[in-house]
Image: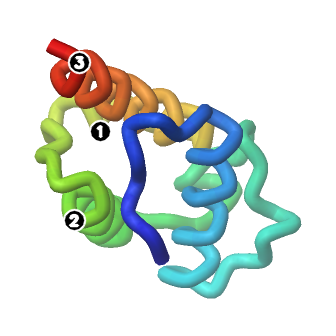
Amino acid sequence: MNTLAPSMTKDQITVWIVDMLHDMFELDKAKITPQSNLYSDLDIDSIDAVDIVVKLNQMTGKRIQPDVFRTVRTVQDVVDVLATLLQADAVNEKA
C-alpha cells in the first residue's frame, strides 16, 4: 500500500481507504462506501479504530489528533480528515 500524497483527490483517498479497510479487516470492498458507518456497518470496534489511526499516522507521516478521530463515524469522515491533513501539507510545501 502506497503512502498518501498531498496531491491526492478525495476520490483517490476514498479508494485508498477502501483498500486499507479491506486489507486490515478483510472487509468486502463492495460493502465499503463513503456512507458506511465504521462501527455499525463495518463492525469496527474501538481497538480497530486505534489500529486505523496508527496506520494513517504511518502512511501520512503525520499525527492525527485523537480528539479529531473521535468525531469520525463514516468512511467519508475518514476521507475528509485525511484530505484536510493532506491539504495542510500541500500548503506548507508551497510556503
Q: From mark 3 to mark 2, how far is it between C-alphas? A: 23 Å
**Label 1 close to label 3 by CB (< 8 Å):** no
Q: From mark 2 to mark 1, how far is it between C-alphas? A: 15 Å
Q: Residues within 10 Å of mark 1 (few under 14, many from 20)?
A: some
Q: Where does residue 51 sit, x and y in percent of width and height?
A: 29, 70
Decide which of 74, 58 is in the foreground and name it: 58
Going 58% across and 67% down the picture, which residue do you hit?
Answer: 43
Q: Where does residue 13 sit, x and y in percent of width and height?
A: 57, 46
Which residue bears the numbered disc 2? 58
- Residue 69 badge: 1
Q: Earlier in the sequence, mark 2 or mark 1?
A: 2
Q: Is residue 80 visible?
A: yes
Q: Is residue 45 left or right of residue 76?
A: left
Q: Is residue 48 left or right of residue 15?
A: left
Q: Where does residue 94 sit, x and y in percent of width and height?
A: 23, 18
Q: Is residue 43 above or below residue 64?
A: below
The quadrant in which the C terminus is found is: top left
Which residue bears the numbered disc 3? 94
Q: Earlier in the sequence, mark 3 or mark 2?
A: 2
**Label 3 close to label 2 by CB (< 8 Å):** no
Q: Is residue 93 above or below residue 94?
A: below
Q: Where does residue 17 sit, x and y in percent of width and height?
A: 56, 57
Going 27% across and 53% down the picture, which residue do you hit?
Answer: 60
Q: Amino acid at mark 2?
A: Gln
Tell me the mark number nearer the camera, choosing from 2 and 1.
Answer: 2
Q: Amino acid at mark 1?
A: Phe
**Label 2 close to label 1 by CB (< 8 Å):** no
Q: Amino acid at mark 3?
A: Lys
Residue furthest toward the front?
Answer: 94
Determine the image quadrant of residue 19.
bottom right
Q: Secondary structure at mark 3?
A: helix
Tell me the mark number nearer the camera, choosing from 1 and 3.
Answer: 3
